[in-house]
């Protein structure tokens, strides 16, 4: 029988046949796909004809279609719905796929063909997109070590395979710690908690086969628990368990793994002639250098720290007024900050959530995309890979442009956080391909599911990434959608968050899930008034993580990352009651793969642009201004990596931005400055 993973898919959109796929299908599908990709690559490298763009670059673009198809399904399922079999296969595949990548990028004959094309690029008659693709292929091979010979080449290959293995282990250890820790909650433990937190805790208990409510390390449960629980001792237990993920000793401890990852990254960079991994990693990014990254982060650090320290003093006063002596601690901040928000802005999450049902916010994201870009969303029937998953056909002017899938609820088989990925990317080479795009979140399940304002912002954020994939309009998959520099990729997602708070979006979609009544204008005003509330805290905890990430990678790899972390935090004067957003043993962004390594700063780099980009709509006097929306699609969302990111942004905005809109958006700009 034909392996279902290697078929063309089902229905008019050629969706993966999820109902027919079993875990036993993945290993043989990968084996067959790798064999085909190797044969295709060998044929390109050994082609006796002189290299051309068609017989080399375009041939490579089409050489691993089966592998892309299988990997697109497997890795999405492994992240969103892990099973022991999938986790075992991930561990087995990591070094194999790393070895295959090395075979390609360090193939001397193949690189010789690409290099010859690069040297003769001005004589090839390439269009702008083809020139960009050739540039990026040559860059990829060079930075992967294609020019290395002998022992350094072999060492590079070994480093990549080892990194693939241990970054996978880091991620699985983190998932295991999150999945395995829970604490049964008595009725006394539930005192003072809003109904939505109690409902979430009881649902978590049912998922784990427990009678009654449990506290877990899912962000959708632990953050509101820390916000609302008056039980300080229990807040401390929960908080310390949360920040200790990956640092509990035993088989799931990530501290030694983090040290080895940093050492191998440094060695990899030095094999290629760079002073540090950070210098290597940042070279193709917008930032270019560690100095540029540090300059941005420290420009924001001073006002953010000042705001956080002023807030800490007020929270400590509130705590002492409650009869609690001593210092304000990290497990106190969210609780007293929530009480202060209620006191100063006269609302809390309990007031907001009934107006932010999941269905309403999905509708708001879709309606915004319709008004900006003319997109229509039609529900699709499954089956998808999990009963919680929903799907839609995305069309414009009667033409299908994408399939969108949403997997919104937290469960034990899903890694934490929220993300967007493509099961299949857009391209035109070899025939137009409609992308299949997936948003994954970890919202608390309910009937109906009610979101916090931060949850709704997350939904809009990930949908911004999805638009970057769905509106992609390029020929080559290599530059499709979100295949852009790391410090540019967050621009579409963070920009899209702005529309959540546009008054007419809230008026149209923020409606009470029982009565259908619109969110009252006074509540919307309170929400707007609190928009920059607690930004000192959130900015400081983010910057602390970004600065530690940079310090890990811009010099010699630390033998003890935890000691280095402590040194960096002491050096910047991190306030006592705030910790890093992601401590080293659970910093999946930088240790579960290379994606955000020496790149966690990129959220703030992109925020400089997104704050400025939304001002373009404000300057036009309309959040849905058609001309500005068209420019956004033309130069950002549809363009992929067809031009350098600074060129794309300048084409959209006419110039590059300064940091002032970011500070203004976070409420950190001195009014007298």
Image (tube, rainbow, N blue to C red):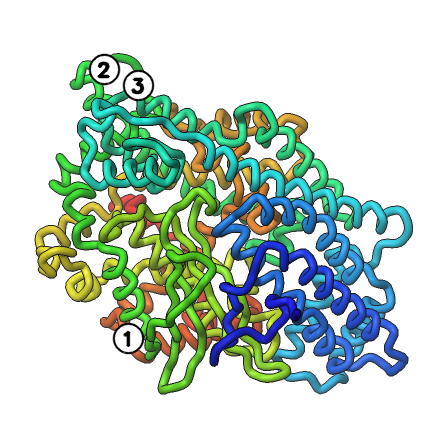
Image location of residue 220, percent across then percent down = 34, 42
Residues under numbered marks 3 and 2 in contact, where contact means CB atoms less than 8 Å apart: no
Of residues 86 and 295, the one nearer the viewer is 86
* 10 Å crowding of disc 3: few (<14), some (14-19), many (20+): few
The residue indicated by pointer 1 is 371
Q: Residue at x 26, y 33 (%)?
A: 227
Q: Is residue 596 above or below residue 472?
A: above
Q: Which residue is drawn at 44% across and 30% down?
A: 181
Gap in Å between the C-alphas at discs 1 and 3?
Answer: 49 Å
* 10 Å crowding of disc 2: few (<14), some (14-19), many (20+): few
The residue indicated by pointer 2 is 324
Q: In this view, does 222 lie above or below 105?
A: above
Q: Is disc 2 placed on a helix, strand or loop? A: loop
Mark 3 or 2, nearer chain start: 3
Q: Residue at x 14, y 45 (%)?
A: 351
Q: Is residue 628 visible?
A: no
State which mark lies toward you, 3 or 2.
3
Q: Is residue 89 visible?
A: yes
State which mark lies toward you, 1 or 3.
3
Mark 1 or 3, nearer chain start: 3
Q: In this view, does 526 lie above or below 358?
A: above
Q: Is disc 3 placed on a helix, strand or loop? A: helix
Q: In this view, does 432 lie to the left or right of 512?
A: right
The N terminus, quarter of image: bottom right
Of residues 121 and 338, the one nearer the viewer is 338
Q: Is residue 264 left or right of residue 87?
A: right
Q: Could you say which quadrant of the image residue 364 lies in?
A: bottom left
Q: In this view, does 627 lie to the left or right of 504?
A: right
Q: In this view, does 332 lie to the left or right of 178?
A: left
């Amino acid at each position: 029988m034909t392996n279902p993973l290697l078929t063309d898919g089902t229905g008019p959109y050629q969706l993966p046949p999820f109902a027919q796929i079993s875990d036993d299908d993945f290993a043989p599908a990968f084996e067959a796909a790798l064999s085909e990709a190797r044969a295709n690559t060998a044929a390109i490298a050994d082609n006796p004809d002189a290299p051309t763009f068609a017989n080399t670059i375009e041939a490579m673009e089409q050489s691993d279609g089966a592998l892309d198809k299988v990997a697109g399904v497997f890795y999405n399922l492994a992240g969103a719905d892990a099973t022991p079999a999938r986790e075992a296969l991930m561990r087995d595949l990591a070094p194999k796929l790393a070895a295959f990548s090395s075979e390609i990028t360090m193939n001397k004959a193949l690189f010789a063909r690409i290099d010859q094309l690069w040297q003769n690029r001005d004589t090839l008659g390439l269009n702008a997109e083809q020139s960009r693709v050739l540039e990026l292929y040559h860059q990829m091979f060079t930075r992967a070590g294609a020019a290395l010979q002998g022992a350094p080449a072999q060492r590079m290959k070994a480093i990549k395979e080892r990194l693939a293995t241990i970054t996978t282990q880091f991620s699985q250890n983190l998932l295991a710690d999150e999945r395995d820790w829970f604490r049964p909650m008595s009725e006394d433990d539930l005192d003072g908690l809003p109904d939505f937190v109690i409902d979430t805790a009881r649902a978590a208990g049912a998922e784990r086969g427990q009678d009654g409510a449990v506290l877990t390390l899912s962000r959708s449960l632990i953050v509101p628990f820390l916000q609302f629980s008056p039980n300080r001792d229990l807040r401390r237990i929960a908080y310390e368990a949360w920040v200790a993920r990956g640092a509990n000793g035993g088989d799931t401890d990530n501290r030694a793994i983090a040290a080895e990852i940093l050492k191998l990254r440094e060695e990899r960079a030095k094999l290629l002639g760079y002073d540090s991994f950070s210098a290597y990693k940042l070279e193709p990014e917008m930032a270019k250098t560690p100095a540029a990254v540090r300059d941005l982060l420290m420009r924001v650090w001073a006002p953010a720290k000042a705001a956080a320290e002023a807030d800490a003093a007020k929270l400590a006063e509130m705590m002492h007024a409650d009869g609690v002596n001593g210092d304000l601690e990290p497990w106190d901040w969210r609780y007293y900050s929530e009480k202060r928000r209620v006191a100063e802005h006269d609302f809390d999450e309990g007031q907001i959530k009934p107006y932010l049902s999941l269905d309403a916010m999905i509708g708001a994201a879709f309606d915004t995309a319709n008004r900006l870009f003319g997109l229509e969303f039609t529900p699709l029937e499954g089956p998808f890979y999990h009963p919680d998953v929903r799907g839609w056909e995305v069309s414009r002017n009667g033409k299908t442009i994408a399939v969108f899938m949403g997997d919104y609820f937290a469960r034990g088989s899903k890694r934490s956080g929220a993300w967007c990925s493509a099961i299949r990317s857009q391209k035109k080479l070899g025939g137009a391909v409609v992308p299949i795009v997936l948003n994954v979140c970890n919202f608390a399940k309910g009937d109906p599911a009610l979101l916090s304002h931060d949850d709704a912002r997350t939904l809009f954020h990930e949908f911004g990434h999805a638009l970057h994939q769905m509106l992609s309009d390029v020929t080559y998959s290599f530059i499709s959608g979100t295949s852009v520099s790391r410090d540019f990729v967050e621009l579409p997602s963070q920009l899209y968050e702005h529309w959540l708070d546009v008054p007419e979006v809230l008026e149209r979609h923020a409606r009470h899930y029982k009565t259908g009544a619109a969110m009252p204008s006074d509540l919307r005003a309170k929400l707007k008034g609190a928009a920059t509330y607690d930004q000192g805290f959130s900015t400081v905890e983010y910057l602390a993580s970004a600065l530690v990430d940079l310090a890990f990678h811009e010099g010699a790899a630390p033998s003890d990352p935890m000691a280095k972390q402590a040194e960096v935090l002491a050096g910047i004067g991190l306030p006592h009651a705030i910790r890093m957003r992601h401590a080293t043993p659970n910093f999946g962004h930088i240790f579960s793969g290379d994606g955000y390594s020496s790149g966690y700063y990129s959220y703030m780099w992109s925020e400089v642009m997104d704050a400025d980009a939304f001002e373009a709509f404000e300057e036009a006097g309309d959040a849905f201004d058609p001309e500005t929306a068209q420019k956004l699609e033309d130069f950002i969302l549809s363009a992929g990596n067809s031009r350098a990111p600074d060129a794309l942004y300048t084409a959209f905005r006419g110039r590059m931005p300064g940091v002032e809109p970011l500070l203004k958006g976070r409420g950190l700009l001195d009014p007298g400055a």
